[in-house]
Image (tube, grey):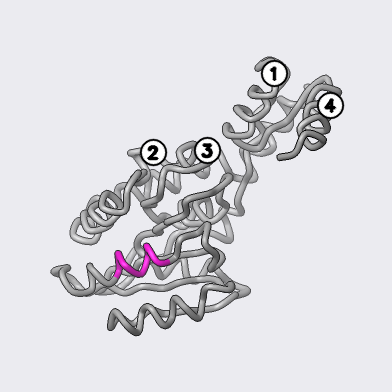
Amino acid sequence: MDANSKILNSLCLRLPDRLAANSANGVRYAQAFGIKAERIFLLPNVVDTELFRPAADDSRGDSVRLLFSGRFVEAKRPEWFIYVFADLAKTASVPVRATMLGDGPLRASMEAMAGRLGVEVQFTGSVADPERYYRQADILVLTSWHEGTPNVIMEAMASGLPVVATRVGGVEDLVSDRTGYLCDTYEEMADRVRELVHNPAKRMELGREARSWIERKHSFESLRSHLQSLYS
C-alpha cells in the first residue's frame, strides 16, 4: 500500500461517527489504523441458509467426497488440494473422490497435475448452482495462503459440511474446533482430512455444528437483528 492510499484509508476510517466491519478481521484492520473499538460495529457477512442447506437424506453415498471451491489462482493454492486427494486416493481404507468447483488461469495446469499423479478429479468450471455440489460433498478443503473472509466457507458450513482450512485472514473467525480444523502446514492439513475421511461420526458432528453456527451468526435472520442493533 503506497503513502497516498494509507492517508486516504485513514481519512475514510476517521470521518464517520460509526464504522461497520463485516468481519473480526476487518475490526482488527480498523483498530490498526487507530480507530477505537467503541466506534466499530461488527456486521458479519451472511449466507442464504435456504439455498445452501444440508442434503435432505443426510447421506452422500459410499465414498467420501472432498470439495475445493474457489478461483484457480496462486493465492488459493489448488495444488495442495490435489496432493491431499492423491495421497488419500492411494492410502485411505474407503473410496475417496474429489471435486474442484470453479475456474481460473491455473485450471489447465491442475488438470495436468491430476493426470500426472494418476487421480481422477472432477473439474466443474464455473457453475450457476454451486449449492448442488456442496450437498454432494462431505468435507470442504480450503488451501489458500491468502484470504479475507471466504464466502465459500460459510456456504459449506450452511450446507452441513465440516471444514479443513489453512489458518489465514478471517478464516479462524469462522472455523473453530467445533466446526472443523484450522491448519498451519500442509502435513497438518493432510492429517486432518485423513482423520475425517475415516471418521464419519466426527464428520456428521462437525457438520451439524457448522450448520447451527451459520444459522445463529451468519444467516439472513441474524442479519436483521444485527442491523437493528447498528441503527439503534
Residue type marked 3: Arg
Q: Where is residue 164 in the image (x, y as percent from the top left)?
A: 36, 52
Q: If you read the primary sequence from the N terminus, does the residue marked by circle 1 or circle 2 appear first?
A: 1
Q: Which amino acid does label 1 sit on?
A: Gly
**Residue underneath mark 1:** 34
What residue does disc 3 label?
Answer: 216
Q: Mark 2 points at which residue?
A: 176
Residue that numbered label 4 is attached to? 11
Counting from the top left corner in percent of width and height, residue 108 is at 50, 81
Q: Earlier in the sequence, mark 1 or mark 4?
A: 4
What kind of element bears circle 3? helix
Q: In this view, does 43 lie above or below 16?
A: below
Q: Identify residue type, mark 2.
A: Ser
Q: How far apart are marks 1 and 4 (CA)?
A: 11 Å
Q: Earlier in the sequence, mark 4 or mark 2?
A: 4
Quarter of the picture holding the N terminus:
top right
Q: In this view, does 189 lie above or below 212?
A: below
The span picked out in magenta is 79-85
Cα distance, mark 4 to mark 3?
34 Å
4 and 3 marks in contact (CB < 8 Å): no
Question: Between 71 and 124, which is closer to the camera in this rendering?
Answer: 71
